[in-house]
Image: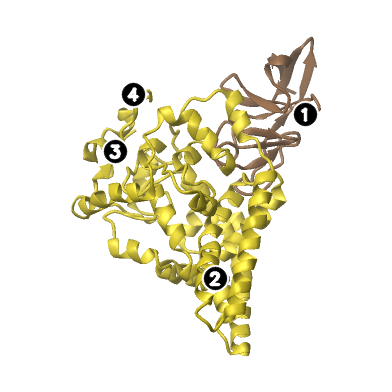
Amino acid sequence: MATAVKTKRDYSLVGESTRIAIETGLASAEWYHTDLPRKAMKELMQRSDGPAIRDTIIWIAAIAGSAAGIIWFWGTWWVVPFLVVYGVLYGSSSDSRWHEGGHGTAFRTRWMNDVVYHIASFMVMRNPVQWRWSHARHHTDTIIVGRDAEIAVMRPPDLLRAALAFTGILDFRYSLPTLVRQAFGRLSEDEKSYIPEMEQHKAVIAARWHVAIYVATIALAIAMGSLLPLVLIGLPRLYGSWHMVLTGLLQHIGLADNVVDHRLNTRTVYMNPISRFIYWNMNYHVEHHMFPMVPYHALPRLHELIKHDLPAPNPSMWHAYREVWPVLLKQLRYEDYFLKRELPPTARPYRDEFHALTIPAAAE
Amino acid sequence: MGDWVEACGVDDVEEEDVIRFDHDGRTFAIYRSPDDEFFATDGLCTHEKVHLADGLVMDDIIECPKHNGRFNYKTGAAKGAPVCVNLATYPVKVEAGRVLIQVG
């Protein structure tokens, strides 16, 4: 299997990089896993409704409380702290709820996962059908150029775009027109490449529901002569998504692409408890990708069991961004450059035979 | 009708668990349900050909370890995205402490 893409990367899902990924065996490849006894794995995979019900009650109470504060203090400066809290809960924590609900791991009870998934999908402005499939592809072909539909920062990196991502403007500009286009029954060629034909009509129906709610919200705002309905529904995706970007960008940025070992292309970062609540422990991201069956609340335990086989986690977000920044600058001139993270002596080595052509470009 | 093939001993599979069984170039998954019955299906997920024996058994559901697709392992029914195609199932019987499956 060869892994290098020495020509310019083509991030479309139906282009030259797609063809190369399929021909070289990078697509749908077998990935590296740390060995873990079945008994330990079974314990880690066990589902329970308890932790997610507790977290969801806290989550809904915080959303409702901050929304009440916005309504109460609307028109005064006292509204600002409530906007900050509500914005992050709506525009950022919805991403992790979408994610865990989509995997079906947060709750043991399926319908609970589905309810949270659909509510969070609406909040984060994602078509629930389209994104279920795009995320399945992301797990099959993590950061494989031409295959993965969820590569946040492409190479060479567009730093202005990455910076603007913190404002939510770009994502908003992409997500809303995408939903409208899909509501009119039009799926892009990329979308068709990962949504099975038998599921495509469901994506259109879901988009119509989302758009209908936005239309109703706009109508209510016009009828009230107030922005308040939009501040509560829709616009938080703009002013509250910064935390999602802050945590989510670190998942893969600056690391290898076109490899089949999550230790090379994914990052685990230690984070503070508030960010971990918002992010539902997805800071343990190597662990999540290696074993997607493990629920968010068991990821810290999984981390303890396999950390001997993984690169050392970044001790903080600040540390991770300091590590990433010079890599991005170098990628501006030399897009094959990436950060190859060192393994501890207890780890099984990277399988260089799989990555022989990309490894030389790494910063050790 | 296919041949009956010995897959494993009853004690090789824990309750509410699954093991892999390879035979004649094919791979199967052998399940032991919480009420101590045995079942057999194709061993690979119909979505991305991942071994289901690495997945999680919950009641009568097997969840794929890669994308969390779910099947009813008793009927083979796919329970929703990202799995859309049912799993093939195989007759199972237990004789003298051994689990046998009828391969088609």
- Identified by mark 1, the residue type is Pro
Secondary structure found at label 4 = loop
Q: x, y percentage for residue A127?
A: 56, 62
Is residue A323 left or right of A80 when viewed as pictured? Answer: left
Same chain? Circles 4 and 2: yes
Same chain? Circles 3 and 2: yes
Splitting the image into 4 quarters, where does residue A347 fall?
top left
Mark 1 in CB contact with mark 4 (< 8 angstroms): no
Numbered disc in front, either 3 or 2: 2
Secondary structure found at label 1 = loop
Q: Chain of mark 4?
A: A
Numbered disc in front, either 1 or 2: 2
Chain letter, yellow:
A
Marks 3 and 2 sit apart, C-alpha to C-alpha, by 41 Å
Mark 3 in CB contact with mark 2 (< 8 angstroms): no
Q: Colour of chain B?
A: brown
Question: Which residue bears the numbered disc 3?
Answer: A340
Which image quarter is the C terminus of chain A in?
A: top left
Query: Which class describes the residues within 10 Å of circle 2: few (<14), some (14-19), or many (20+)?
Result: many
Q: x, y percentage for residue B84?
A: 64, 47
Which image quarter is the N terminus of chain A in?
A: top left
Label located before the other in sequence (4 or 2):
2
Q: Is residue B57 visible?
A: yes
Label located before the other in sequence (3 or 2):
2
Marks 1 and 4 sit apart, C-alpha to C-alpha, by 42 Å
Question: Which residue bears the numbered disc 2?
Answer: A82
Numbered disc in front, either 1 or 4: 4
Marks 4 and 2 sit apart, C-alpha to C-alpha, by 48 Å
Question: Which residue bears the numbered disc 1?
Answer: B34
